[in-house]
Image: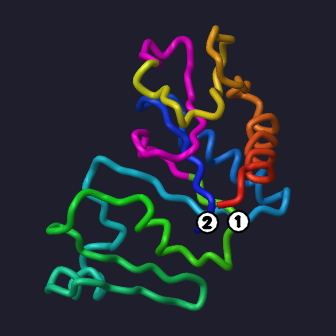
């Protein structure tokens, strides 16, 4: 299975902002990166009025939209149990990726980088668990976990590269 590394934080802390900067850094260092983003909202990547949208709404359980530059598979899941991260990761092409970054899924039992901003007014306790391998923050904290400067993309990126290189074989 492709290694999974979570990026977790309270809403508004900057998970997406950090990932938008660290993914290009990792690519510059030769890593092929996939991403799974958890959303608490209904997700629809299709466009109302387009044929694919209308056919999916007509009852297709799975709809694939394909072009010469990309393809996307949409699967209807209203009767399935809650999302399973390992199942979602298994949908990726293992031969095309070195790592899958996971935004959200904070309660999953995977290694994670937790994000914390001192002026956020948000509690840190609910995102810290035994799977947090680093804390990216803008203020040093007295915690027994490696701390990274949340504003230093190279430091965060180098940590991820080192984590990937040194993680135990599974």
Q: Residue at x 46, y 54 (%)?
A: 37
* Residue 37 relative to residue 167: left or right: left
Q: Is residue 69 above or below residue 32?
A: below
Counting other residues with Cα less than 10 Å from the Cα at mark 1, is it few (<14), some (14-19), or many (20 or more)?
some
Verify CB contact (< 8 Å) between mark 2 and mark 1: yes
The residue indicated by pointer 1 is: 98
Pointer 2 or 1: first along the chain? 2
Q: Residue at x 23, y 70 (%)?
A: 77
Work out which quarter of the rendered image holds the N terminus and state it: bottom right
Q: Is residue 119 above or below residue 7?
A: above
The stretch in magenta equals: 102-124
Counting other residues with Cα less than 10 Å from the Cα at mark 2, is it few (<14), some (14-19), or many (20 or more)?
some
Q: Secondary structure at mark 1?
A: loop
- Please identify the residue farthest to the top as the structure is shown: 142
Residue 143 is situated, as x and y percent measured from the top left of the image, at 62, 14
The residue indicated by pointer 2 is: 2
């Amino acid at each position: 299975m492709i290694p999974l590394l979570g990026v977790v934080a309270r809403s508004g802390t900057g998970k997406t902002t950090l990932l938008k900067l660290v993914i290009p850094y990792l690519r510059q260092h030769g890593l092929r990166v996939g991403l799974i983003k958890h959303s608490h909202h209904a997700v629809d990547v299709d466009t109302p009025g387009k044929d694919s949208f209308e056919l999916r709404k007509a009852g297709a359980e799975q709809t694939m939209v394909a072009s010469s530059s990309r393809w996307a598979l949409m699967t209807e899941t209203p009767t399935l149990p809650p999302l399973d991260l390992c199942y979602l990761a298994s949908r990726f092409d293992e031969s095309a990726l070195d790592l899958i970054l996971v935004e959200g899924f904070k309660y999953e039992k995977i290694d994670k980088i937790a994000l914390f901003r001192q002026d956020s007014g948000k509690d840190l306790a609910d995102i810290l668990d035994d799977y947090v391998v680093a804390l990216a923050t803008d203020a040093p904290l007295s915690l027994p976990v490696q701390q990274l400067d949340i504003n230093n993309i190279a430091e965060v990126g180098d940590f991820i590269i080192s984590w990937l290189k040194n993680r135990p074989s599974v």
